[in-house]
Image: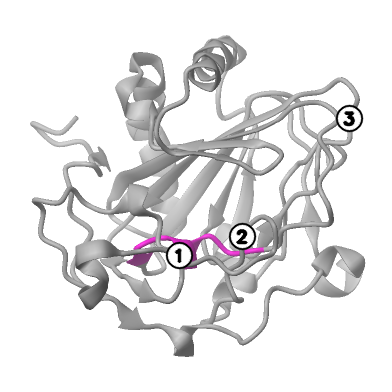
């Protein structure tokens, strides 16, 4: 299913006892946020889990890495980054935020995947992710916009001279409002029990509405992986998440394999890997 549709559900990926421990750990990070936090009416926080022993064990689990590698069709899977999303009950948002993840990140390739884990039961009314199946096969991206619908740009600093002119990679418009005609576009909605996950290609168009449940939290923890064909990329004129760049002392070349101490090998594990 993943290869054809760019998305597949992984039921019961994480046992409920670990789910409960992860809820506690993530709530601690909500109370004590790190550097990379976004508040757009809901909480988004990234690049923090490797420093937490419990979360690190999950993120670097070779079984999780093997699932990612097999879905990608890659012989390897390296951890790229982690990302938490929290919608408290009764957190509506205007419309839907249809988007593809990849253009925001300094990477290119087909072997880039997300495993989105739901830590509570989650239905469409409580901001469950929905997808446009097959959209990962389109070779161009929809114009990347922020959560508020405005264009996103960023300062690449000393690495700006390495960026490519990426205009040919993008449509000249944002993603359509696929939810307004879901049958025509084949929009796929999932419901999740706590511990269920969905794995998707980061070119696959996806979205969620707000959390309109009066009493149900929506807490999701997404792990991003990179595989064999992932290559470094900086796109001029588009926000490129600075949290995802290699350390300043590490080599960066557009088109080079993704190599950084920040992105440890998860699958297959070899002697000396962690």
Residue 1 visible in the displayed image: no
**Percent x, y of residue 79:** 32, 42
Q: Residues within 10 Å of mark 1 (few under 14, many from 20)?
A: many
Q: Residue at x 81, y 46 (%)?
A: 93
Say whether disc 2 or disc 3 marks the residue closer to the N-terminus.
2
Q: Which residue is mark 1?
A: 239
Q: Which residue is mark 3?
A: 213
The image quarter in which residue 237 lies: bottom left
Q: Residue at x 35, y 24 (%)?
A: 56
Q: Which residue is mark 2?
A: 146
Q: Is residue 137 left or right of residue 267?
A: right
Q: Is residue 168 left or right of residue 120?
A: left
Stretch of the chain drawn in magenta: 99-107
Quadrant holding the N terminus: bottom right
Residue 123 visible in the displayed image: yes
Quadrant holding the C terminus: top left
Q: CA distance from mark 1 to mark 3?
A: 32 Å
The image quarter in which residue 215 lies: top right
SS state under label 1: loop
SS state under label 3: loop
Q: CA distance from mark 2 to mark 1?
A: 9 Å
Question: Quick check: marks 2 and 1 in contact, CB under 8 Å?
Answer: yes
Q: Residues within 10 Å of mark 2 (few under 14, many from 20)?
A: some
Q: Residues within 10 Å of mark 3 (few under 14, many from 20)?
A: many
Answer above or below: position of 17 versus 203. Answer: above
**Circle 2 or circle 3, nearest the eye:** 2
Answer above or below: position of 195 versus 44. Answer: above
Q: Residue at x 16, y 42 (%)?
A: 261
**Circle 1 or circle 3, nearest the eye:** 1
**Percent x, y of residue 199:** 56, 48
């Amino acid at each position: 299913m993943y290869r054809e549709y760019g998305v597949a559900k992984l039921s019961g990926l994480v046992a409920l006892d670990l789910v409960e421990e992860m809820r506690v750990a993530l709530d601690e990070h909500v109370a004590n946020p790190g550097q990379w936090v976004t508040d757009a009416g809901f909480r988004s926080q990234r690049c923090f889990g490797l420093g937490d022993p419990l979360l690190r064990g999950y993120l670097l689990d070779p079984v999780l890495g093997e699932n990612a590698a097999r879905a990608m069709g890659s012989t390897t899977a390296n951890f790229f980054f982690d990302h938490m999303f929290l919608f408290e009950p009764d957190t509506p948002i205007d419309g839907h935020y249809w988007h593809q993840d990849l253009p925001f990140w300094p990477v290119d390739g087909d072997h880039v995947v997300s495993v989105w884990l739901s830590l509570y039961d989650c239905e469409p009314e409580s901001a469950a992710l929905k997808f446009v199946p097959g959209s990962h096969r389109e070779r161009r991206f929809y114009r990347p916009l922020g959560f508020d619908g405005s264009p996103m740009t960023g300062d690449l600093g000393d690495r700006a001279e390495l960026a490519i002119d990426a205009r040919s990679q993008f449509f000249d418009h944002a993603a359509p409002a696929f939810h307004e005609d879901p049958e025509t576009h084949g929009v796929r909605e999932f419901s999740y029990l706590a511990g269920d996950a969905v794995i998707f290609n980061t070119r696959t168009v996806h979205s969620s509405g707000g959390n309109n449940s009066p009493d149900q939290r929506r807490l999701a923890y997404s792990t991003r992986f990179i595989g064999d064909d992932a290559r470094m990329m900086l796109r001029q004129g588009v926000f490129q998440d600075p949290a995802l760049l290699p350390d300043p002392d590490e080599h960066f070349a557009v088109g080079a394999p993704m190599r950084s101490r920040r992105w440890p090998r998860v699958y297959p594990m070899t002697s000396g890997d962690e």
